[in-house]
């Protein structure tokens, strides 16, 4: 994707307009997003000729107020300018109720609400009861004649007033009053006023006349808070068609999309422009996607906005979701060097450094965030991660609580605080933290996985299994999720289902290994495992479960695969299981790198990709030796037992097995095998 000079000029003008209009309506996060993109477009070379400079200056919009192309709206805005300036000043001072009362006194709002109540069925059932009533009675009070800009500001201030009071009612984070039941009491008022406004302006063909898109956005937010998600999406999509540069509207839609299928279904309904292109990338990353198409799309956008902090963050998260932590860390490091005072998304960077156990870099990041703004939620999360890495879990909880005091919707803080409570053996608090994280964002697989772990600690395996399955559904190609499902099924004595889940874990791990550079593996689909490393722990667990259900041939094949991982799994399969097939519709043939039939091969420190001797491979070797004893293959049993003695694992048991082999061979009159 490349833009010519005229298209770049149009894009600059659209972003300038977005910055001004969002600022007028106090949508500061959307305004910041547009302003950062605007400044990420490389400036054209301008000669110092005065005439050219004067021509260039005419291409920039006014930075005070945006002109309104609708004559009726322009007249209303001109009349209200003094009140508008007062209301905006009060909003900036966080006096939301006063701001709203400038245009909509409480008496006016009460009249609209009471009028709606008389025209709706009392105590109606259904999620959208506050927004599906009949039209306003003709005898009810008429709506005040306000410009859409002033009306949005007044209703948005009333909405934020309710959000602020909701947090105040909850009091201390996870205190006695903070049980997740506090609601925004202004949603009903704002929702009914907006419904009345849209009904009043509705034409015979169902259109809303000359609406500008801002009130649709606010109505969608209110409906989303009321859990009326389908109707919320309808109004948010309408808003994007009327004013596509409001990034906050796109983010609201992202929060309502929980599956890739939902994203694919909604994309044709959206306007086709560069913002919808960014929305698709951002939402795909929120759904943990990381394929080649996303990487190519990001590269195209970075050609237009080479220094965009938003797109550079997306690039880093793309590597993070692909488990390429080194590349993700490098992307975040570059982002930090370009924007050293930007704290957005640095909580993700601290998670990466935590997993990489990079204590010096995490300490530097914590110090940097504290020096920029120690009372930003992101700063508190970064510092909390640093204390967690030092195993100071109580201190970490303190900082995560501080982050939540600043912003109750800080997802990272809820999830990470749950992890800390697990470390502190406070399972009740951990469960509550994870539940609150899921309430904030139901796509957070870490919270679902944490709930599964916590219930597993409590030995409530049915609950744990349900939560693990939710996590695996969100991250179907993450082997860790399927390992948890398989282990839980094993504890519930559902071995056949557990085997399927663990085989899925093997396929998932091979997917990340072969696709880590956003490309497909050579000559095979995602199920092709030839030449890839498999986790010996998973192989041993599968073999043990096969042994439990008395399927010894399959158990033997997986034990041999486990041993073969010491040298990278190089060897020809001689086991009965020619591939990992979860069930008939599992992807690909899944031919595995099984070890040789006798489990021999290069060992010790391992091959180029091998694991070397591990506790899992030694247990598998011991099982194979005992199996050889049961089948009277004494030569193989003796060789495997001698290898165990060299491994230094389970040596005493191996020596006892060697003595048993020799005694049986002597009893059967067989010649003693040569020593090693």
Image: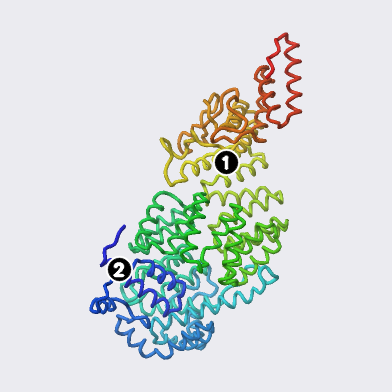
**Distance between the Cα atoms at labels 1 and 2?**
56 Å
Image coordinates of residue 127 in percent, x first then y, are: 51, 67
Task: Determine the residue located farthest toward the left in the rendered image.
Answer: 51
Q: Which residue is mark 2?
A: 44
Image coordinates of residue 285 in percent, x first then y, are: 46, 56
Task: Determine the residue located farthest toward the front in the rendered image.
Answer: 48
User: Which residue is drawn at the image coordinates 34% and 81% (left, top)?
Assistant: 62
Residue 648 appearing in the image:
yes
Q: Quadrant of residue 53?
A: bottom left
Q: Identify the mark at residue 501; answer none if there is no mark.
A: 1
Say if 94 sits above or below 675 in the image: below
Q: Nearer the viewer, mark 1 or mark 2?
A: 2
User: Which residue is drawn at the image coordinates 41% and 84% (left, top)?
Assistant: 138
Image coordinates of residue 649 in percent, x first then y, are: 71, 32
Q: Quadrant of residue 497?
A: top right
Q: What count of labels does the image hold? A: 2
Q: Secondary structure at mark 2?
A: loop
Q: State how the image is colored.
A: rainbow
Asked whether 69 or 19 is in front, the reply is: 19
Say if 363 sits above or below 356 in the image: below
Say if 538 sits above or below 98 in the image: above
Determine crowd level at label 1: few under 14, some 14-19, many 20+ residues with C-alpha closer than 10 A.
many
Check whether the beta carbons of the residues at disc 1 and disc 2 lie within 8 A of each other: no
In the image, taking residue 52 as reference, residue 471 lies left or right, namely right
In the image, taking residue 106 as reference, residue 549 lies left or right, namely right
């Amino acid at each position: 994707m490349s833009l010519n000079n005229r298209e770049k000029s149009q894009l600059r003008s659209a972003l300038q307009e977005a910055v001004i209009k969002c600022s007028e309506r106090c949508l500061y996060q959307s305004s910041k997003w547009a302003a950062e993109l605007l400044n990420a477009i490389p400036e054209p070379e301008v000669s110092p000729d005065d005439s050219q400079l004067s021509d260039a200056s005419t291409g920039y919009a006014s930075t005070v107020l945006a002109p309104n192309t609708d004559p009726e709206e322009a007249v209303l805005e001109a009349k209200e300018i003094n009140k508008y300036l007062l209301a905006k000043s009060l909003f900036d001072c966080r006096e939301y109720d006063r701001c709203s009362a400038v245009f909509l006194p409480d008496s006016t709002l009460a009249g609209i609400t009471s009028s709606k109540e008389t025209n709706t069925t009392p105590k109606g059932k259904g999620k959208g009861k506050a927004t599906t009533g009949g039209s306003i009675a003709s005898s009810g009070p008429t709506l005040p004649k306000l410009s859409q800009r002033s009306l949005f500001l007044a209703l948005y201030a009333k909405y934020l007033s309710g959000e602020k009071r909701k947090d105040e009612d909850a009091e201390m984070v996870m205190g006695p009053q903070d049980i997740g039941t506090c609601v925004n009491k202004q949603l009903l008022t704002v929702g009914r006023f907006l419904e009345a406004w849209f009904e009043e302006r509705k034409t015979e063909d169902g259109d809303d006349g000359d609406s500008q898109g801002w009130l649709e956005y606010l109505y969608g937010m209110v409906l989303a808070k009321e859990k009326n998600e389908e109707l919320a999406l309808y109004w948010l999509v309408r808003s994007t068609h009327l004013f596509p540069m409001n990034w906050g509207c796109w983010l609201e839609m992202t929060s309502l999309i929980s599956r890739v299928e939902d994203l694919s279904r909604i994309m044709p309904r959206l306007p086709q422009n560069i913002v919808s292109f960014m929305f698709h990338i951002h939402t795909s990353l929120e759904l943990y996607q990381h394929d080649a198409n996303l990487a190519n799309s990001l590269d195209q956008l970075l050609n237009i906005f080479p220094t965009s902090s938003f797109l550079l963050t997306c690039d880093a998260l793309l590597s993070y979701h692909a488990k390429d932590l080194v590349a993700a860390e490098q992307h975040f490091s570059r982002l930090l060097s370009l924007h050293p005072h930007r704290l957005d998304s640095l909580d993700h960077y601290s998670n990466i450094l935590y997993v990489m156990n990079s204590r010096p870099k995490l300490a530097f990041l914590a110090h940097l965030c504290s020096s920029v703004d120690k009372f930003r939620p992101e700063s508190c999360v970064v510092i909390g991660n640093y204390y967690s890495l030092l195993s100071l879990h109580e201190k970490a909880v303190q900082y995560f609580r501080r982050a939540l005091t600043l912003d109750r919707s800080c997802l990272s803080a809820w999830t990470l605080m749950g992890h800390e409570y697990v470390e502190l053996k406070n399972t009740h608090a951990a469960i509550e933290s994870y539940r609150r994280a899921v309430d904030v964002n139901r796509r957070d697989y870490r919270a679902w996985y944490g709930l599964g772990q916590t219930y597993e600690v409590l030995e409530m395996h049915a609950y744990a299994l349900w939560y693990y399955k939710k996590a695996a559904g969100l991250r179907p190609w993450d082997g860790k999720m399927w390992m948890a499902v398989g282990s839980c099924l094993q504890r519930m004595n559902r071995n056949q289902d557990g085997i399927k889940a663990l085989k899925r874990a093997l396929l998932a791990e091979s997917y990340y290994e072969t696709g880590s550079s956003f490309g497909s593996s050579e000559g095979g689909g995602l199920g092709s495992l030839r030449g890839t490393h498999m986790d010996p722990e998973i192989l041993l667990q599968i073999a043990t479960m096969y042994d439990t259900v008395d399927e010894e041939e399959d158990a033997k094949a997986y034990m041999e695969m486990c041993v073969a991982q010491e040298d990278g799994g190089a060897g020809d399969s001689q086991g009965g299981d020619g591939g990992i097939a979860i069930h008939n519709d599992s992807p690909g043939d899944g031919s595995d790198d099984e070890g040789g039939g006798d489990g021999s091969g290069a060992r010790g420190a391992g091959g180029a990709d091998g694991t070397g001797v591990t506790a899992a491979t030694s247990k598998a070797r011991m099982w194979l030796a005992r199996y050889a004893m049961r089948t009277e293959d004494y030569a193989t049993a003796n060789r495997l037992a001698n290898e165990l003695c060299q491994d230094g694992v389970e040596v005493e048991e191996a020596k006892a097995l060697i003595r048993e082999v020799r005694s049986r061979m002597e009893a059967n009159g067989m010649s003693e095998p040569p020593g090693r």
